[in-house]
Structure formats: structure tokens, C-alpha cells
Image (tube, rainbow, N blue to C red):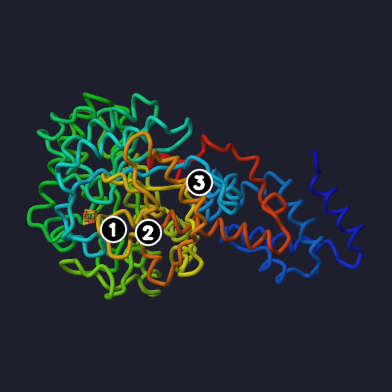
Amino acid sequence: MHNDNFLKNELLKKYNNLSLSQIEQDIKKIVDSFSMKPWTSQEYIFEKINFRDKQYLLDLNNVIRKNHKLQLQITKNSAAKKYWNTILPFSYRVNDVINNNYKFPLRIAIFPGVSCMFYCGFCGRNQKAKYDTSIIDEGISKINNVISDAIVGTKISISGGLEPLTNPRLGRIIKKGHESGFKIPLITNAYSLTEGYIKKNPEIWLLDSLRVSLYGYDDASYKKITQLDKSFKMVKRNVINFLTSRNEMNKNLKVGFNFIILPENYNYLKDVLKLINEINLEIKNGEGINFLTLRDDYQSVTGQDENFDKERKYRLNESMKENERKDLLKIIENFEDLRLQLCPNLHVDYGYSLEYLSQRIFDRGLVKIKGEKIRSYGFSQLSVAIDLHGDIFLFREAGFLNRQGNEKVIIGRLDDKKNSLERNIKNFLSQRKPIKFDESDSRFLDSFDHVLNSLVNQVEEDEKFGIPLNSGPIAFKNFDIKESIGNNWYSDDI
Ligand code: SF4
């Protein structure tokens, strides 16, 4: 058992030219930096401390690592806690990524959609592309083989890519996942979540959670984003019917909305709560909407360069400006008051960067990796995505059929058991052909990928600097590993 004062006294003895207050100041600098930016490099910290000696930095890290209160302050109670939720359970695999060792991915995103009926202006999909329906059965069987091979602790989710409910036999994948012992979440736009679809895919009741991407709060706002008439009416009706049936079929299935905050809609955040309240009032047989996730800065993630992804009906060009983010800070404050009034039981997940604003700390937006900083072998040991062709994508925003330039991040294709996920990844890693990325390729990473990429880069840089992961300020090994990888939005995971 190490006592904090004992460790500090040891430091005082060792560095007798420093005062206790200087040492405490340095500890605070490190704690504050990691509470705001988990990807802070040791070299950066080294430049900031009073006494530039690597052993001194190692000793400071040691004090912080052994102080449980500081560990919780940084990773669980800071503005960056959402980032830490992602980072902590993946960190033990980072050295395998750096050394190109094969490991079955910790997280697999399945993209079984055939097409999509919406034309969202921030979406990177190729709006002219759809899968040939003749490949659906083969595609499902490839995906189900991956689920069979998945090891305990793997987190599997179903989303897009395109819209998953355009796959008429989606239930088979959900059933396979459930039978294999995985808790499966589904992300959908809910346009096809009709009684007829559910009748054909009753396995939907085996899901762990269902998250509906919400593109507005009334007819006009929905039409503006999706470009489809009556999309709001359809989605609202489907959600109300689904919740009513959920309360009869499987009360444990959590249902929620995801709302993407854009410059075009951030002023209307309170209308989302009003909509949830309106829907909940329609549900007479139990709970209504369980959770709401808020995500921002989305079109800046999917890419704004007009030279790319031209196959779109329209495109939202702007990302949030600094003054808009400042307004958003105020809006979120009022939003919390209204939430307590209208939906006190609603779990709100602010996601990576809005968490700062919800704690009244100004933040400029998501961490993003650019160009040559993208890992040239990805990080398949941590995460991959798989579509209906059985194509394996290194990054999740690349998983759209024929998205311009995405071939470079497809590392293989599943066929049957002979060409399994494991074999494909092993082939790719053993060929030693690094992918060369340029500036525009960052649009293939979603916000989760950006966080993982930042983590790997940070560990690599720190090691080069002479401070490996285990000598940093975070006691990674104290955090429960596999079980803590989040795979839902209704509790405080990622
Ligand atoms: S964001 Fe989703 S719903 Fe909108 S166009 Fe893209 S795939 Fe379709």
C-alpha cells in the first residue's frame, strides 16, 4: 500500500532542489491535462513541468498512478470521461496494434443494410449505390460465420453502413448473435420498423437495445435532412407502435434516440425533449423512450470536401462554429432543466465532446486524426466493420458500398469458413503492405475510430520518448478489461 504523502516525501528527498508546492503543482498539471485531453503526450507534459528530468516525470506518474482518488478524478469524473470510457478497456491491446500482432477484434460493427431511403446531407454514403438483393442470403451466412467465430467478450453491434432494416432477413443475424450469447444493439432510422417488418423478423425482440437515429422533431425538420416526404410521420408512428409492443414482448429491450447536433438544428434541442415527452404520453402500457444520445460535429467527421463523395442529393457544408458552440453550452444548460421537468427518467448520453459542454466547460469539438497520422494498418485488433459482401473495413465510416476511395481500407473479403475473418486479417497483417493515407482519408474514421487511433499514436509516441504505457500516469491494469467495453447507450458506457 503506497501512501500519497510518503511518495511525495520520497520525491522531496530525491529532488531536494524542489519544494512540495512545486511537486504538487506538477502533479496538478498532469492530472488537469489528462482530465481534459486523454491523448496528451508525455513529451508535452515534460515541457510543462518545473524540472525537466525524465526520471522526475516517471516519479510523478508513479504518484498519480498509485492514487486511486486521482485515477477516478481523471477517468471517471472529468470532462473527458466519455473518451476514457472508450480508451480504458482497449488500452491493453494497443501494443498488439503497434507490433502488428494478430488478435480477434474486440469490437465488430455489422453493416447488413441493402440500401437506404434517406439522403441525409452529412452522410458519406454513395447515394446511388445499393447491394444486389441476390447476395443477401450469402451475406447473412458470412456475417453469421463471423459471429460463430467471435470469442467471448467480443462486442458485436448492427448498424450502418446503409439502413439495416432494408435487409429483409435481418432477424437471422440477431438470432445468431443472441444464440451465441452476445448482447446485440441495433441502430436504425426506423423508417421500416413497421408491424409488417417485425412480423417477418420477430427476432428483433431478442435485441439488447434499439437506437433510432432521429433527424428532426417535426415534418419540416425531418424533410430538410432526409429529403423524404412523410419521413417524420412514419418514424414517429413506428416508434410509438414499437414501444407499445416492446412493453409486451421484452421489457428489457431498451429503446432510445440519437440526435445529431448540426448548426442547422442545435437551437431546437429542446424540441427533441418535447417530442420524447409526446411519444411517452402515447405509451399506455409501460415505459417509453429510455435513452437519448446526443452527438455533434458530425459532418466534420464524415467529410466536407466537395471533391469527394459527390453522389449526394445535397450536402450540409458547415460544421459548428466557435460562437455556435458557445450558444450550445447555454442551450444544454436549459436542456437539462427541461429534461428534469419532462423526462426525468431519460438517460442522456452526451458523447465525447458534448460531455464537456454539459459540464459547462467549453470545448472546440471532437479529437480528430489527419492524413499520415492515420494508422497504416488500422487497428483490427480493436475494431473492424463488415458489410453484406463480407468486406472487412478498417474504419467504420468507410463501410458504405462504393464510397469514393474506400477500397484502400477494405482489407479482405469473407467467403466461407476457409476465408474467415481471422485468415483475412492475418493475411493483411503478414503482407506488410502499409496503407498510405492522405488528408481526405480521415473522413473514413468515425469519432470512435479517431479516439482509438489517437490512443495508439499516443502510446507509440510515448514509448519513443522513453515512457511506456505502464509507466504513464494511468493505472490501466486496475480497470476491469473485457467486461468494461461498452456496447450500449442506456448506461454510462461509450
Ligand atoms: S445517415 Fe443513415 S439514414 Fe441518413 S442517409 Fe446515411 S445511411 Fe441513410
Q: Residue at x 27, y 75 (%)?
A: 306
Q: In 3D space, how far apart are the residues under numbered discs 1 and 3 (Cα atoms)?
A: 37 Å
Q: Amino acid at mark 3?
A: Gln
Asked if marks 1 and 2 touch (Cβ < 8 Å), the reply is yes
- In the image, taking residue 157 as reference, residue 114 lies left or right, namely left
In this view of the protein, which residue sits in the foreground, 68 or 334? 68
Asked if marks 1 and 3 touch (Cβ < 8 Å), the reply is no
CA neighbours of label 3 inside 10 A, class few (<14), some (14 to 19), many (20+): many
In this view of the protein, which residue sits in the foreground, 400 or 239? 400
- Please state, as top left, top right, bottom left or bottom right, where the N terminus lies in the image: top right
Q: Is residue 109 above or below residue 241?
A: below
Quarter of the image for residue 291 reads top left
Q: Is residue 216 above or below residue 414?
A: below
Q: Amino acid at mark 2?
A: Ile
Mark 3, residue position: 381
Task: Give coordinates of residue 144: x percent, y percent.
Answer: 32, 33
Q: Amino acid at mark 1?
A: Leu
Q: Earlier in the sequence, mark 1 or mark 3?
A: 1
Q: In 3D space, how far apart are the residues under numbered discs 1 and 2 (Cα atoms)?
A: 8 Å
Mark 1, residue position: 269
Q: In 3D space, how far apart are the residues under numbered discs 2 and 3 (Cα atoms)?
A: 36 Å
- In the image, taking residue 238 as reference, residue 8 lies left or right, namely right
Of circles 2 and 3, which is in front? Answer: 3
Task: Give coordinates of residue 206: x percent, y percent.
Answer: 28, 28
Whether residue 482 is visible to the viewer of this picture, yes or no, is yes
Task: Give coordinates of residue 27: x percent, y percent.
Answer: 73, 59
- In the image, taking residue 3 as reference, residue 343 lies left or right, namely left
Q: Residue at x 33, y 61 (%)?
A: 406
Q: Earlier in the sequence, mark 1 or mark 2?
A: 1
